[in-house]
Structures are given as structure tokens and as C-alpha cells.
Image (cartoon, rainbow, N blue to C red):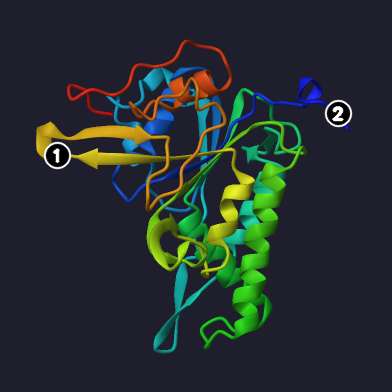
Amino acid sequence: MPSLASHPSTDLVKLLLFGPSGVGKTGALATLAEAGYRLFIFDFDNGLDILMDPSILKPEFRKNVYYKLFQDKATPVGNMLMPQATAWKLFMTNLADWKEEGKSLGGFKTWTEKDVIVIDSVTLASDCAFNEALGMGGRLGQRPQIQDYGAAMDSLQSLFELLYSEHVKCNVIVTSHLVMAVDEFSGGVRKAVASVLGNKLAPKLPRYFNNMVAIEKTGIGTNVKRRMHTSGTANLDLKVSKPSVVPAVMEPDLAKLFSLLKGESVPAAPVTTTQAKA
């Protein structure tokens, strides 16, 4: 049996980023673009406008950010709206081979440690996976059956297994909204978990991410403050791969977090009450 001295550690960051809408998850991506990372954003939320604000992302770094929108647009059919169920298949195609104006920019097999796959967010990506399952079963616009939920969750779990695997040699960030659920392993205590399809998949997500952090927003108006939590609480499980160098609470700077996790920087100072707006 090998010792820890021969453990194949990696500098890649596989991160699950929690937070409600508007808390600053997408805006925090700007720090990575400004640090020289190339971002490939698979946008299911249609919420990238914040990155066009020059106070969030300096215009000269926009060239480091590529994005594509994945949504199942609905079309009127009789008295109802029918989703097209094309987004999930298109998403998987672009994950394997991202093209811009007919030119391939690579995919998950060729992207490197200076590239970042961003899925924003898995909450709405789940809806697209479910529509894909309904379409495959010929039940779009109809009452779903139990096997449709199972097929969609299988697709999502296969995605997480892929992103976690050694075949993906780039960094990964998956954003997620939160939902309260009963934790069966802690005597029925209610916990905040990833908002993803079904109630059986969310508890499995931590096995696919070495790092799980949450962004919090407090205050209103000009007094808004944002901070990032990296240590778990009684009702929210969080973790980082290097807790000895990553503060439990810090500014929502993903580039600084990446630097700490990769051993490229001294520990960041904990967030203070005078923390600047993200």
C-alpha cells in the first residue's frame, strides 16, 4: 500500500459555489478572468450582465471570458407552452468541443489548469436535464413519470462523475442555489443543500467536489457587504482541501481562493467589517 508521500495530489480546483440569487456568485468569477484564467461559462441562468459592469470586470479582461446560453425556450402548442428540450444535448456537445465562429477552442479533454469550466447554475441545468428526459420518453408537456426523474438524475450524476474524473484536467466551478431539506443522517435536522433535481442527488454532490464554499450578502444599498464562507456550519456543509491556509471567512475573491488552494500565495486576511463591495 502506498504512503501519503506518493499521493497523486493535484492543483486543479473542483469547486461547488453556493448562494441565493443576487448574492454575487457570478460577479466573483471576474477575479479569475483578471488573474489570467480563461473561463468557459455554460450559462443556464442568463445572468451574466453583471460581468459587463466595468467596476466588476475590467473591459480589457473580457477576452478571457467565453459564454454560451443554454435554455429550453418554450413554444405555444394549443393552450400550453411546450419546452424544446434541446439545451442539455447542446450543453454536452459544447462541453466536449467548444466552437467560436466555427473554430474549436477545445473541450474538457484538452483544457488545462489555466482554464475554468463554469456551470451557472446546476439548479437550472437540472431543469434542462429533466426536459431532456421527458423528451426522450415522449412526455414533453405531459405528466412526468417516475422513470423521467430517474433518467434526469442519472444524467446529472454522470456529469458530476465526468467533471470529477481525471479526464477533466482543468478547473471546475459549479454554482448552485440552496434549498432546505431534512438530513436523514443527523436525526432529521434541516440543512441547506444544493438545489438540484430530486432529494437523493443533493447529498451525493460533496463526493464530487474537494471544495464547497458559500457567498453571503449583508446590508442594503451602499452598505452591502459580501463575504465568502469556507468552513461548514450546523446547517450548511462546506469544505476546502487546504483548511490550514484558507480562512474560514474571507472576501469573495475566487482568484485568491484558487491561489491559496494551489499553494501560490500566502494566506488571505479574514474579511473585516470594512470589506469593500464585491
Residue sitting at the far front: 187
In front here: 5 or 176?
A: 5
Residue type at mark 1 is Gly
- In the rendered image, the vertical position of residue 32 relative to residue 151, given as above or below: above
Q: Which residue is mark 1?
A: 219
Query: Which quarter of the picture shows residue 270?
Result: top left
Q: If the image is split into quadrants, where does the C terminus sit? A: top left
Tell me: 274 left or right of 124.
left
- In the rendered image, the vertical position of residue 162 relative to residue 148, given as above or below: above
The residue sitting at 48% across, 53% down in the picture is: 44
Q: Secondary structure at mark 2?
A: loop
Structural distance between the alpha carbons of marks 1 and 2: 51 Å
Q: Which residue is mark 2?
A: 2
The x, y position of residue 220, in whole percent, is 12, 40
In front here: 64 or 255?
A: 255
Q: How many marks?
A: 2
